[in-house]
Image (tube, coloured by chain):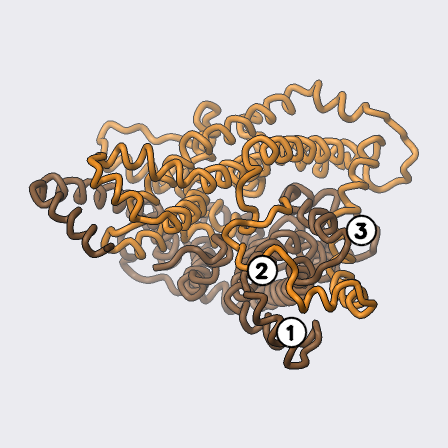
Chain colours: A brown, B orange
C-alpha cells in the first residue's frame, strides 16, 4: 500500500523535475547559510586560540600564519586550570548521581504504584518546572547561607539537584509508564517484590531514558555559573565557568588567549555533543525522534 | 505540569492490573512509597520550595541580607519596583524578547524542521549543526559573541566590511537602538535548535499516509501544509509556545554577560534587573520582591495557558 502510494506520488512529480531541483537548490542554499552562521563564530573561536589578537581581527576565518601554542600552554601549565576542571567534575558527578537516583525513585512511585493522593504529590513536584534556577538563585542563595553551606560543594550541588528533579521525574515517568504492565505482572508471578521489579526489570529497560537524564543534567551542572559565583567565596572551589570569566576579565582584549580558553571548553563540549546527541534528543522529545 | 495521562504513553491500561491490585494499599506498599519519595522530597523541599516561600516573606522587609529582619516594609518593595522606570522598561524588554521569540524564532525553527525533517539528503548533519549551540554554556556563548560584536576588529564588523566596501564599523552592543536586537539574535542562535528538534519529533509522529492521501486527492503542497501537517502538529506548536514564553521571561545569564543590562538599561530584562538592583546593591528584600513578581508572572501565564490552550495535550514529555 505504502509502496504504491510512493510510486503514485513519484509519477505525479516526474513532469516537474526542474522545479523540484530549483526548490532543492534553494533549500540547500538556506540551510548552508544558516549552518555557516552557527558554525562561523565557533570555528573562529577555535582557530582564534592559535592566533595573535591582530590576526584574529584581520582574518577571523583564516588559518594562523604561525600557530601560537603558547596561548594554550600558558593556560594548561597553570595549576589553576586543572583545579577548576576538578571542581567542575565534582559538581557534575555529585549533581548527576543524586538527580538520577532521586528522580528515578520518584518516577517509579508516580508511574507504577497506586496510592491515595498520588497525582496531587506528583503535581507538587512538577511545580518546580516554573522556577528555573537561573531566576530562583537569589532565594536559593539565602537558603544555602542559612544552612551554612557557603563554600561547600553541596551548596551548589543540592540546589542543582532540587531544580533538576521536576524535569527529570517528568521525563522518566513517561518512559516508565510506557513499559508494558504484563512485564510487571510476570515479574511478580516470578516472585519479585516491588523493589525487585524496579531494580531488575524497570531500570535496565529504561536505560535510554536514564542516559538522557545523565546527559541533560551533565550539561546543566557543567554550565552553571551564578550559583557557584554566589556560593563560593573561596576561589579554590571555583569551576571552569567562573575561571573563564575571571580569565576574560584579566586578559579582556587579548582575544587570542581568551579564545584558547574558550576552545579548551568548547572542543570537549562538541565531542560530548556528538557522542551523546542521541540521548539528548531522546530526553527532550520523549523518545520520538529517529533517524 | 499536569496529571492527565498522555495518549502517546497509554500502553498501560487504565484499569489496574492484577499485580497492582494485589499490592495496593498494603503496609508494604506504603513503606516503599515513603522510602522512595523521601530523598527527592527532602532535597526538593529544602532547596526549591522553602526558598521560594521565604522569598515571599523577605519581600515584605527592607533587608540588606546581613542584619536581622526587623524592618517591616509591607508592600513597599513592590511599590518601589512598579514605580521604578528601569523596572518598567525591563518588563517591556522581557515582553519584546518574548514576542520576538514567538514571531521569529518559532517560525524559523518550524520552517527548518519542515525542510530538514523528512527526506532531504544530509538532514542528519544539518540537524546536528543547528542543535549544537544548545549544549554550549551561556558563558562560552556570551564570550564568543562578545568577540563577534566587538566594536574594533570584531568578526561581524570584519565580515561586513569585506562584503560592503563602504560599511562603517558598528558597536553592536553599545548602541541603544540595536543592542536588544543583537542580544535577541544570540538567544535565537543558541536556542532555535531546541524548538526545531521538538518540531521534528512532532513531524515524525504524523502518519505520512494521510498527507499522501491528500496529495492524491489533488491538494498541492501548500494546502497539505495548511490543512494536514500544521493541524496535526498543533500539540507540538502549543508546547513550544509554552516553553518559548517561559524561556524568554527567564532569560538572564546570556544577557548579563553580554551587556550587564546596558547600555543605559536598554537590554535590562526582569532577571537582570533583579540581579542588578537586588543582589549587586545588597538589597535582598527588594530583590526577593522582584523574584516574586517574576514567579507570579510565570505562574499566571502557565496556569492560564494550560487551562486555555494545552488542556487536551499530552504532558508526558519535556
| Residue corresponding to mark 2 | A177
Q: Name the residue under label 3.
A: A145
Q: Which residue is drawn at 76% across and 21% down?
A: B79
Q: Which of B297 and A116 is in front in this view?
A: A116
- Which circle marks residue A197 in the picture? 1
Whether marks 3 and 1 lie on the same chain: yes
**SS class, disc 2:** helix
Q: What element carries label 1?
A: helix
Query: Is B46 situated left or right of A95 in this image?
Result: right
Closer to the N terminus: mark 2 or mark 1?
2
Query: Can residue B95 be seen here?
Result: yes
Q: Could one spot residue B136 in this view of the protein?
A: no
Circles 3 and 2 on the same subunit: yes
Position of residue B197 measured from the top left corner of the image (x, y, whole percent): 41, 49
Q: Residue at x 61, y 56 (%)?
A: A168
The front one of A67 and A92 is A92
First in sequence: mark 3 vs mark 2: 3
Amino acid at each position: 500500500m505504502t509502496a504504491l502510494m510512493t510510486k503514485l506520488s513519484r509519477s505525479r512529480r516526474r513532469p516537474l523535475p526542474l522545479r523540484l531541483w530549483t526548490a532543492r537548490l534553494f533549500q540547500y542554499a538556506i540551510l548552508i547559510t544558516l549552518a555557516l552562521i552557527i558554525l562561523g563564530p565557533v570555528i573562529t573561536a577555535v582557530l582564534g586560540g592559535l592566533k595573535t589578537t591582530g590576526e584574529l581581527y584581520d582574518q577571523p576565518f583564516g588559518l594562523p600564519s604561525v600557530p601560537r601554542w603558547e596561548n594554550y600552554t600558558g593556560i594548561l601549565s597553570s595549576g589553576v586550570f586543572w583545579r577548576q576542571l576538578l571542581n567542575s567534575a565534582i559538581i557534575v558527578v555529585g549533581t548527576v548521581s543524586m538527580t538520577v537516583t532521586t528522580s528515578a525513585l520518584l518516577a517509579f512511585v508516580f508511574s507504577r504504584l497506586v496510592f491515595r493522593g498520588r497525582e496531587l504529590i506528583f503535581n507538587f513536584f512538577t511545580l518546580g518546572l516554573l522556577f528555573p534556577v537561573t531566576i530562583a538563585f537569589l532565594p536559593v542563595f539565602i537558603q544555602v547561607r542559612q544552612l551554612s553551606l557557603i563554600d561547600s560543594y553541596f551548596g551548589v550541588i543540592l540546589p542543582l539537584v532540587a531544580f533538576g528533579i521536576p524535569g527529570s521525574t517528568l521525563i522518566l515517568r513517561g518512559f516508565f509508564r510506557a513499559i508494558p504492565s504484563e512485564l510487571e505482572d510476570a515479574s511478580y508471578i516470578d516472585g519479585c517484590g516491588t523493589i525487585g521489579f524496579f531494580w531488575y526489570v524497570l531500570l535496565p529497560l529504561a536505560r535510554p531514558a536514564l542516559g538522557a537524564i545523565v546527559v541533560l543534567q551533565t550539561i546543566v551542572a557543567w554550565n552553571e555559573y551564578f550559583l557557584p559565583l554566589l556560593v563560593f567565596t573561596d576561589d579554590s572551589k571555583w569551576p571552569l565557568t567562573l575561571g573563564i570569566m575571571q580569565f576574560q576579565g584579566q586578559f579582556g582584549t587579548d582575544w587570542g588567549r581568551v579564545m584558547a580558553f574558550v576552545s579548551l571548553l568548547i572542543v570537549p563540549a562538541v565531542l560530548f555533543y556528538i557522542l551523546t546527541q542521541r540521548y539528548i534528543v531522546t530526553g527532550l522529545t520523549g523518545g520520538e525522534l529517529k533517524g | 505540569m499536569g496529571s492527565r495521562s498522555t495518549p502517546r504513553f497509554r500502553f498501560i491500561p487504565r484499569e489496574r492490573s492484577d499485580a497492582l491490585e494485589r499490592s495496593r494499599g498494603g503496609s508494604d506498599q506504603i513503606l516503599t512509597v515513603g522510602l522512595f519519595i523521601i530523598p527527592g522530597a527532602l532535597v526538593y523541599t529544602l532547596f526549591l520550595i522553602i526558598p521560594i516561600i521565604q522569598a515571599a516573606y523577605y519581600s515584605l522587609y527592607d533587608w540588606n541580607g546581613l542584619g536581622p529582619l526587623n524592618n517591616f516594609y509591607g508592600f513597599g518593595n513592590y511599590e518601589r519596583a512598579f514605580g521604578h522606570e528601569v523596572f518598567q522598561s525591563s518588563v517591556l524588554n522581557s515582553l519584546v524578547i518574548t514576542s520576538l521569540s514567538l514571531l521569529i524564532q518559532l517560525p524559523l525553527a518550524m520552517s527548518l524542521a519542515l525542510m530538514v525533517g523528512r527526506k532531504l539528503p544530509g538532514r542528519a548533519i544539518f540537524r546536528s549543526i543547528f542543535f549544537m549551540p544548545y549544549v554550549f554554556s551561556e558563558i562560552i556563548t556570551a564570550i564568543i559573541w562578545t568577540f563577534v560584536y566587538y566594536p574594533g576588529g570584531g568578526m561581524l564588523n570584519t565580515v561586513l566590511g569585506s562584503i560592503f566596501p563602504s560599511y562603517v564599523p558598528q558597536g553592536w552592543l553599545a548602541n541603544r537602538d540595536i543592542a536588544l536586537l543583537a542580544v535577541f539574535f544570540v538567544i535565537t542562535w543558541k536556542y532555535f535548535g531546541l524548538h526545531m528538534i521538538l518540531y521534528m519529533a512532532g513531524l515524525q509522529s504524523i502518519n505520512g499516509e494521510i498527507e499522501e492521501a491528500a496529495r492524491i486527492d489533488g491538494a498541492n503542497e501548500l494546502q497539505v501544509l495548511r490543512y494536514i501537517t500544521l493541524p496535526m502538529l498543533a500539540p507540538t506548536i502549543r508546547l513550544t509556545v509554552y516553553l518559548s514564553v517561559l524561556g524568554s521571561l527567564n532569560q538572564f545569564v546570556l544577557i548579563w554577560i553580554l551587556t550587564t543590562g546596558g547600555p543605559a538599561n536598554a537590554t535590562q530584562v526582569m532577571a537582570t534587573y533583579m540581579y542588578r538592583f537586588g543582589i549587586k546593591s545588597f538589597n535582598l528584600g527588594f530583590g526577593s520582591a522582584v523574584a516574586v513578581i517574576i514567579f507570579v508572572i510565570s505562574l499566571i501565564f502557565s496556569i492560564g495557558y494550560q487551562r486555555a490552550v494545552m488542556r487536551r495535550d499530552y504532558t508526558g514529555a519535556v
